Amino acid sequence: MDRAEITAQMREIWTKVLRLDGEKASVLTDDSDFFEYGGTSLMIGIMNIMMAQRFGRTVSPEMFYDGATFGRMVDGIFAKEADNGQ
């Protein structure tokens, strides 16, 4: 899966979990912060479940608390895809 596909699917996950309307979802950038968009610690578990279902992998819980941006999460999933040779 390429980065564009991961980005599109991650955008869907953020939109569902954070309950973003169309306008907010359309302005997600690599610098968009999970917590600034209303994310909570409980939502981290939901996000990881959805990422596991979509990508077969998750991002570390530390990533959520150490600069939990949209771009970092996409990069984290993309890097794991590349490491697995997919």
Image (tube, rainbow, N blue to C red):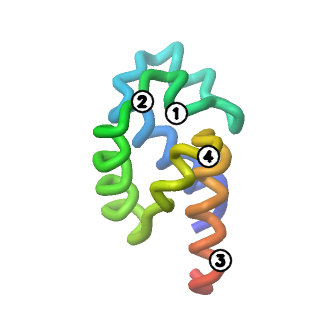
- Which residue type does callout 3 highlight? Ala
- Provide the residue designation for mark 1: 34
**10 Å neighbourhood of mark 2: few (<14), some, or many (≥20)?**
some
- Toward the viewer: 85 or 46? 46
Q: Are marks 2 and 1 in contact (CB under 8 Å)?
A: yes
Q: Classify the position of the C terminus by image quarter.
A: bottom right
**Measuring 30% from the left and 56% from the top, which residue is drawn there?**
49
Q: Position of residue 4 (x, y in %)?
A: 65, 52
Q: Earlier in the sequence, mark 3 or mark 1?
A: 1
| Secondary structure type for disc 2 | loop
- Mark with earlier residue (4, 1): 1
Give whichever of discs 4 and 2 has the lower sequence position: 2
Nearer to me, 4 or 71: 71
Q: Which-is-in-front pick, marks 3 and 4?
A: 4
Q: CA distance from mark 4 to mark 1?
A: 11 Å
Residue designated by label 4: 66
Q: Cα distance, mark 2 to mark 3?
A: 28 Å
Say which mark, if any, is on residue 39.
2
Q: Secondary structure at mark 3?
A: helix
**Disc on res. 82:** 3
Left or right? Give the position of 22 relative to 71: left
Q: Secondary structure at mark 1?
A: loop
